[in-house]
Amino acid sequence: MKVDRRTFLKIAGAGAASLALAACGGTTTEEAVEDEPAAEPVAVRTSALKGPTAMGLVKFMSDAEAGELEDNDYTFQIVASPDEVTPLVAKGEVDIAAVPANLASVLYNKTEAGVRVIAINTLGVLYICELGDSIQSVADLKGKTIYASGKGSTPEYGLQYVLEKNGLVVGEDVQIEWKSEHAECVQALAAASGEAVAMLPQPFVTTAQAQNDKIRVALDLTEEWNRVQTGDEKSTMITGVAIVRAEFADENPAAVDAFLEHYAASVDFVNDDVEAAAELVGEYDIVPAQVAQKAIPECNIVCVTGADMAEQLSGYLEVLADQNPEAVGGALPGDDFYYGA
């Protein structure tokens, strides 16, 4: 089975929607409602990006396609770029979408609080790589040129934050050369002198290493981000989140809760049974199965909801806003942005 990134997977089901919200980040809350009628099944249109955000959904998609989920009618679309997701959300053509963390805030502002975040689905997936063994700490990046892609989004802001917290000034101590694609970063790294390094995300790191086994992961930027947290700071690097249209959430709260329950189970499956999950990732044409098997443990796929989600994500967005308010859409989102917090 190969699924084109523009192809919708339509899964029709019937039955009662779950009334229990399984909190993805740990605790589970169940409310038995015996006397109230069960919610009718609704269509839940979902979009995710190729990469870790879609990888965490593969068991959910597979179970729905196999007819094992009878609470709602689930539709999944896998796209290549955040630019493809934004108009779908803005036009109301999808109900739930997995998007970059800062884009969720941008959409909240652009749609006048028309979206809410329901889960953190991917923590940091950025790594500093080199051909050699000269980088052992962030301080070792002084004097280096870093090839990177993702200017204007999480890669730029995350890298700059880590560098600044370690006393390195971009443009003086460290040069960053922005490329349009990750593959260009790898090519530039191979062609450059030993003074160059590249910032790459998973699962592209694994893909690049399969092509060139001399590429070494020198630094995990998520670890470096956490290392510079001090005092009451609670932020962590966050790559992706799942959002829901506010109108859909208001009209179909049981469907949102059911979605989160299935999503949590899918994430657990992907992290607990990497081999089986990798096969599904390959079948859905996200990345090849052999790449997925090596990459999944490094992809930081999670499902964090509620108060934990709000605390971690709000701290992360504050860091971005301090660097550039436009990174979050001009202003930090209000409390109504955080579903279930």
Image (cartoon, rainbow, N blue to C red):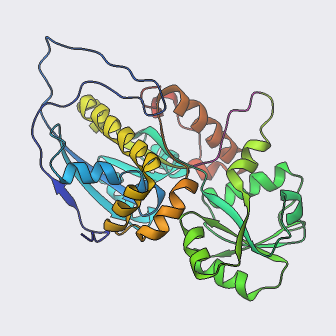
With respect to residue 274, does 15 lie above or below? above
Which residue corresponds to the image point at 53% horizontal and 33% vertical from the top-left? 309
Q: Is residue 234 magenta?
A: yes
With respect to residue 109, does 100 lie above or below? below
On the image, the x and y values in percent for residue 161 come to 75, 51
The answer, for residue 291, to whether it is visible in the render is yes
On the image, the x and y values in percent for residue 256 come to 30, 35
On the image, the x and y values in percent for residue 250 come to 29, 30
The answer, for residue 94, to whether it is visible in the render is no
> Which of 43/64 is in front?
64
Which residue corresponds to the image point at 14% horizontal and 48% vertical from the top-left? 67
The boundaries of the magenta stretch are 232-238
- Please identify the quarter of the rendering in which residue 308 is found: top right
How many numbered dots are placed on residues in this image? Answer: 0
> Which of 101/278 is in front?
278
Q: Is residue 156 left or right of residue 301?
A: right
Q: Is residue 162 left or right of residue 53?
A: right
With respect to residue 69, does 147 lie above or below? below
> Which of 91/261 is in front?
261
On the image, the x and y values in percent for residue 236 come to 66, 42
